[in-house]
Image: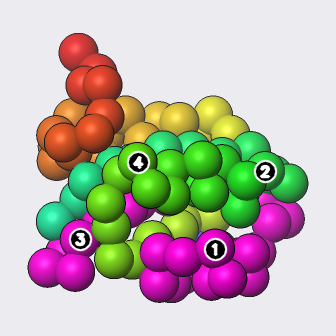
Amino acid sequence: MARKKIRYNKTSIDQLPNDKPVLYRIETEGGNLNYAGIAKKGRIAERIQEHLGEIPGAVVSIEQFSSISDARAKEKNVINRNKPKYNKQYS
């Protein structure tokens, strides 16, 4: 599963790979996690851009998965472990 980190702006987001489902993390400059989410294959840039201006962040990191269900399971673990400020928490 490939990982990639980019600046949190439209230009950088448009350059993300779009060929697999991903777990994305929006992080502050200091590395704190503000939000974690998933995006389906083909919708990655669009999904992350929905957050621009609403969720502060300096970088976005993505982790690719072979299936959306694998990405969803990892998202749940990340949210439960990190309790990001802008996520609705899983129980």
- Looking at the picture, how far across and down is residue 22, in whole percent? 62, 56
Q: Nearer the viewer, mark 1 or mark 3?
A: 1
Label 3 sits on a secondary structure element that is: loop
Mark 2 against mark 4, which lies toward the viewer? Answer: 4
Q: CA distance from mark 1 to mark 4?
A: 14 Å
Question: Which element is circle 1 on?
Answer: helix
Residue 81 position (above or below residue 45) = above
- The structure residue drawn at horizontal position 67% and vertical position 82%, both measured from the top left corner, is 11
Amino acid carrying label 2: it is Arg
Quadrant showing the N terminus:
bottom right
Query: How far apart are the two marked residues, 2 and 1, measured between alpha carbons?
Result: 14 Å
- Disc with the residue nearer the chain's start (2 vs 1): 1
Describe residue 19's horizontal placement relative to residue 64 as left or right: right
Q: Amino acid at mark 1?
A: Lys
Q: Is residue 17 left or right of residue 72?
A: right
Q: Indicate the quadrant where residue 64 lies.
A: bottom right
Q: Amino acid at mark 3?
A: Thr
Q: Are marks 2 and 4 in contact (CB under 8 Å)?
A: no
Give the residue at mark 1.
Answer: 10
Q: Provide the residue designation for mark 3.
A: 28
User: Mark 4 or mark 3, which has the lower sequence index?
Assistant: 3
Which residue is drawn at the image coordinates 53% and 68% (left, top)?
Answer: 62
Residue 65: x, y in percent?
A: 65, 57
Three-letter amino acid code at disc 4? Glu
Check the image and tell me how it is coloured.
rainbow
Instruction: Determine the CA span between mark 1 and mark 3.
Output: 16 Å
- The magenta region covers 4-31
Pick whichever of labels 3 and 2 is earlier in the sequence: 3
**Helix, strand or loop for disc 4:** loop
Residue where numbered disc 4 is placed: 54
Residue 43 has which mark? 2
